[in-house]
Amino acid sequence: MNVKPRDILNQIFPYKPGKPVGEVQRELGLENVIKLASNENNLGPSPKAIAAMREALAGVHEYPEGSGYYLVNAIAEKFGLAFDQIILGNGGNDLIELVVKTFAGPGDNVVSAHPSFIMYRIGAMIMDAEFRGIPLKDYRFDLPAIADAVDERTKVVFIANPNNPTGTIVTRAEVDDFLERVPDTVLVVLDEAYFDFVTAEDYPDALDYVKAGRPVMAMRSFSKNYGLAGLRLGWGAADAELAAAMHRIRQPFNANRLAQVAGVAALDDDEHLARSREMVAAGREQLYRGLDELGVKYVPSEANFVLVDLEREAAPVFEGLLTLGVVVRPMAGWGLPNALRVSVGKAEENDAFLRALATVLEK
Ligand SMILES: Cc1ncc(COP(=O)(O)O)c(C=O)c1O
């Protein structure tokens, strides 16, 4: 057989998810495994979303509503947008790929930072576009250096705000300056997957730029504060003409039936949103205190995870934590061999992580 994948695939390494928690549990003979590896919401989904999905289950023989009618209307109303400015996705991941497919092709380039969310690079490479990952400065997106890297073949800039895996933000003033410097032929995507967890006063809301008619796309996810990661649901907002271009090539049903009803219900569940936010704000402080006590360095975060810098190879510590039933994310694959990323969980989970870390570091 002589069938061959495209050459570019030799340069794309697949996203490496952790082992299923059930498997880790079985292998280690542990009763309880704590997962703080994927920046999920350990409070679970909104109870309102669960109820809405139960009701919708008997209807899954029908295709989803192709325009996302009810969910898009709910988003439009909640965030003050027009229906045709909004596009749904099978998670933010789907939208990232869709943006690149819509705006960049071979010979073009896509600019972002390194290390940042891996899908920006993969999205560019799928399209045979060049990816420029500009090094972070003090763990933050270096917007002046990114502006310098933009040229006449740049079609999209991705700014993860907050950034994954560092949890840092860029400020409104920095984004304002950046938009002044970058030509308006470039679509600037502000990926706000962790929007709800930010407490910094000078954090910009990407929707303000969209509403002001700037060449900006705002991207949000239902996977984090809404606790719906398993359903795969995200949305973006941009100028209606840009959104229309993306609609042309998206999968017709890229937001599934259960995700749509759950999304509508979750948007309306202020109590669950507030509880999730509080859990993360308190959990971050708890982790900082515990890490300070252990003398372990970390990057203060505006998201639901904290990047921990062990100042030595992190892989053995990751393995040690795993044997104690705590799963976090090793960062070697992101070019940070001394770092672990730990998601903020419930108080008792954060505590279990800190105790396990103390045990492993003592050895
Ligand atoms: C910065 C960033 N953007 C987008 C996503 C995509 O999230 P999802 O596809 O679950 O909506 C993630 C997920 O971890 C992320 O960290």
Image (cartoon, rainbow, N blue to C red):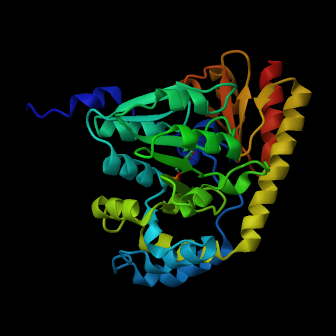
Which of the 4 image quarters holds residue 288?
top right
Res. 8 in view: yes
Q: Nearer the viewer, residue 117 or 43?
A: 117
User: Which residue sits furthest top?
Assistant: 312
Res. 33 in view: no
> Percent from the top left, x then y, of residue 127?
29, 40
Q: Relative to residue 148, is residue 231 depicted above or below?
A: below
Which of the 4 image quarters holds residue 81?
bottom right
Q: Nearer the viewer, residue 361 or 161?
A: 161
Q: Relative to residue 269, is residue 213 depicted above or below?
A: above
> Percent from the top left, x then y, of residue 161?
62, 45
> Percent from the top left, x then y, of residue 108?
32, 35
* Left or right of 165 in this view: 104: left
**Image quadrant where one finds the C terminus:** top right
Write the residue at 53% across / 55% down.
219
**Image quadrant where one finds the N terminus:** top left
* Left or right of 33 in this view: 350: right
> Percent from the top left, x then y, of residue 169?
68, 41
- Total numbered labels placed on residues in the image: 0
